[in-house]
Amino acid sequence: MSEGKLLNDRYQLLERQGDGGMATVFRARDKMLERDVAIKLLHDDYSDDDEFRERFRQEARAAANLSHPNIVTVHDFGYDVGKLFIVMEYIPGADMKTLIRRSGRVSVKNTITLMAQACAGIGYAHRAGLVHCDVKPHNMLVTKDKRLKVTDFGIARALSSIQHDEYSEVVWGSPQYFSPEQATGAAPSPASDVYSLGIILYELLTGTLPFLAKTPEELARLHLTQVPVPLSEYVPDISPALEQIVAKVLAKEPARRYRTADQLGRVLETFGMREPNSALQPVSVPVSQPISEPALSTPTYVPNPDPTPVYQHLPVVEETPAYTYDYTPAPAPVSRAPINIDWASVGLGLLALLLAGGLIPFWMWIYFIYNPPIR
């Protein structure tokens, strides 16, 4: 498929934006509504594959049901000239991975701004009953008006369809960013997306991924067994509070992380409001110390083959307003004045009582002397 082609007599392909193993992204023109759109066009090799066609339809359905300013809007889904395609809003910006490659480490201020928006989009999906399952910076686009938008719900899972004890022999996703439970083929959860957001947070702050390896299997092992190098090893003046947040998000067990992206977003925005001196106490994290490896079978890892679009460079993203909180301190306990006892007066009173009690028999004896009883 080349530029100039008209799909469904409506969408004219204008410019190729990016290629991937599964699809190609074009900038196109919606001739009916006279606006630019992005078209994701499934490759010929996958158009006849039932599994990939279903994944493509799933992405369109999942994203079309999400309406949020931090999620790319899906306008249409179609089929023409033997190809499936998705029509999405066109984002004239840069994906976050491109920004990281160009700038290296990102400032704490801009990191909090970007990640708070990412958490807002992913958190909305969680509330809608979806787990993204492939959260990575390639799937986060930054618009010209400094808005981050999440895209690519190609392997998203509905929470209602996930069984807590399920296991898959084939793992779809990106090994650099997926969670330890995803690495073993276990059931994903919103906490799995939170872990992936933590990997991105770590990468933004340090300029590098926490785990690097040559094969997906080795990366999976690192996610399961290794603790990342603490942020302070890369950024000595990093806030201990932020280091603590990242350590919690990258916990191996899902129960030890924030449960949803919304929770992580609120924590990050609250951190952004604080002065450095009022930060939390640091958390102790060992440097690259192994954890006992669980005895699990090794699934097959299949990277998500969707393309990574190429976009133009954007200006530095400014910080967005954070939440405010009302805090009313609890009333202080009422102190009671101590009771002062005059022990001297008490003693004199008792002595007087004893003396008075002792005179009663004496006066009775005098009475009976002068008034003897009549026999």
Image (cartoon, rainbow, N blue to C red):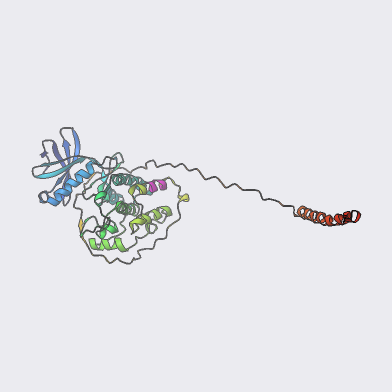
Residue situated in front as seen by the camera: 16 or 127: 127
Q: Number of labelled discs?
A: 0
57 relative position to 236: left or right: left
Residue 366 occupies quadrant: bottom right
**Position of 311 relative to 227 (above/below):** above
Give the residue at x 68% y 50%.
Answer: 339
Q: Residue furthest left?
A: 81
Q: Is residue 239 visible?
A: no
Residue situated in front as seen by the camera: 357 or 139: 357
Q: Residue furthest right?
A: 370
Q: Which residues are magenta?
A: 266-271
x, y percentage for residue 210? 32, 58
Residue 253 occupies quadrant: bottom left
Give the residue at x 31% y 42%.
Answer: 315
Give the residue at x 41% y 56%.
Answer: 236
x, y percentage for residue 37? 19, 38
194 relative position to 36: left or right: right
Q: Work out which quarter of the rendered image holds the N terminus and state it.
A: top left
